[in-house]
Amino acid sequence: MGMSLEAKYEEFWRQAIKQLNDVVKATGLPIAPDEKGQYSLWYDVRELRLRFSISVERIKRFFEGLREGKIYATRCRRCGRYYFPPQADCPYCRVSDMDWVEISGEGELLTYTVINTKPLTFSHYPDYVVAIARMREGFNVLAWLRVDDPRKARVGMKVKLQVVKREPEGYLTYEFVPIE
Amino acid sequence: MRGVAIVGVGHAKFGRRTDATLGELAWEAVKEALDDARLDQKDIQYFVVGNAGGWSAEPLPAVVIGEYCGLTPKGAMRVEAACASGSAALYNAYLAVASGMADIAMAIGVEKMYESPTPTVVEFIGRAGNYFWEFENFGLTFPGYYALYMTAYMNRFGATEEDFCKVAVKNHYYGSMNPKAQFYGLRITVDQCLKSRYVAWPIKLYDSSPITDGAAAVILASEELARKITDTPVWIRSIGVATGTANLSKRPDFIGLDAAYQAAEQAFRRVGIEHRDTWKYFDVADVHDCFTIAEVMAYEDLGFTERGTGIQLIREGQTYKGGLIPVNLDGGLKAKGHPIGATGVSMAVEMTKQLRQSVEPRDRQADVYVGWALSHNVGGTGHYAYITLYSLDKDGSPKVKPKR
Ligand SMILES: [Zn+2]
């Protein structure tokens, strides 16, 4: 797996900032040629770090469920609609009267892909299969499909949704596993 | 609502434009559009900027561009509809003129993607959908989202990776002739495409549009002014607008983009044509080929051909000049480049030039029989869709093209 996510990310910026400082020291300005060595660029001396904090207050039950090894959807008590991802409100009935229902987890693959070129924040994982499956209840779920070889994935294959610990971060999430 | 025409167009060179700032790049397009319409900044009463941003430094692109291009103090806003931000800008400027709130307005699309390193750009685009439920845990990428469609389409209709590569070959063929295109002068073969590396199986590098800097601008005028400004006004006859769910998992199938279908339905209804065999009403079209699968789905969502048969059009070469309907004679997003917020406006520029029959070289000028053109601009993975119909006629429904 090589260098950890954080280490890789930090290293990327450490190198960039070091180069920037060297250039400023040598020339008095953060100006250097672009990647192709063609045009002059001002390399930003200000950094903006982004990590968001997102409310899960109204769907806490979902995350408590993961701790119990269960995956929940919400279901509107008035119209019976399932919501996955779980929603706290049914916009069609204009009510917030929702049941938390454990989902069967059984489904059939509608489609999938293998992410070969990964986002930087996913670069520490081996190539992963992202799939969408239709659950027995009728709604779809998007998640990783756990297969040792991506070529084993097939549209129409039967899968089961499972709570797993995502390593190396060690947090709980869910994943499809094939049913033989 | 009154008639609205495009009376001036401008287009910057697309590519890795590290030689220009956001303002400078926008100015290349704005200046060309003002020159084309022989208008001054003081004539522009309102302007709208399509820009997705995030990867570029300026958080308020509309005012930065307004100041640089001398458009201040005219009213403006920046609009976002992901990869359809340019069409959203066009739509907003169109509404301003159609409603009578402005007599002359400008839509500007601009994007500076090379202000951030590629990994940051990949990260940003991957988040375009539903960030929390589809990116945070599952790390989708932009090609990844479309790959979900390509897998399903191939499985359902027996299309092959080779079929899709033919879209890339066609668009590079035309892009190679377009001096404003990122890949000007660069043709590719099916074999090269097939051998390129996978970025999100089954999508390969050569199925994908590149990271691009670029700008484009169009000037719109009311029917009272349009004919005074130009002898060849190109009328915006209809715009259909729709959205798709943020979460891809909320969609019933993955063989077409419902937002594009819905937007097309609206656009066609407004000019009184049915949503089938629509190829026969248009001399030329630009469609949103961010990935090769997207162009094939566009043929079907637009009703050029029935669901599942779009791949046949590409196999038969029916979307080259001289075919049933020529598509992306400017190189498309694939070869012209895809500067997110500029793409929709760039399509409007190209459709205007096609209808004016002023495209050079002539090998990429469509034959104009009925004087109608169409642009199809999708934001995200069918998250937003804008279908715009252009005509040389201010009134009346599209006529059927003569048989060749
Ligand atoms: Zn309900």
Image (cartoon, coloured by chain):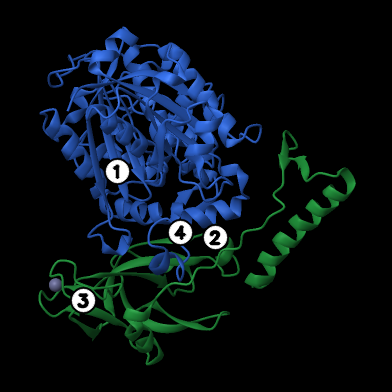
Q: CA distance from mark 4 to mark 2?
A: 12 Å
Is B38 or A168 nearer to us in this picture? B38
**Which residue is the site of mark 3?**
A136
> What x and y, as percent, mark residue B31?
51, 20
**Colour applied to chain B:** blue
Residue tagged 2: A118
Front one among B52 and B128:
B52
Rendering colour (chain A): green
Are both tags, 2 and 3, on one chain? yes
Q: Quadrant of ligand 1?
A: bottom left
Q: Which residue is mark 4?
A: B127
Element at label 1? strand
Q: Residue at x 47, y 38 (%)?
A: B62
Q: Determine the CA span between mark 2 and mark 3.
A: 31 Å
Q: CA distance from mark 4 to mark 3?
A: 28 Å
Label 4: state its secondary structure. loop
Have a look at marks 4 and 1 and say if they share a chain.
yes
Question: At label 3, which amino acid type do we have?
Answer: Arg
- Mark 3 falls within which chain? A
Q: CA distance from mark 3 to mark 1?
A: 31 Å
Residue B48 location, quadrant: top left
Q: Residues within 10 Å of mark 4 (few under 14, many from 20)?
A: many
**Does residue B366 show up?**
no
Q: Amino acid at mark 4?
A: Arg
Q: CA distance from mark 1 to mark 2?
A: 26 Å
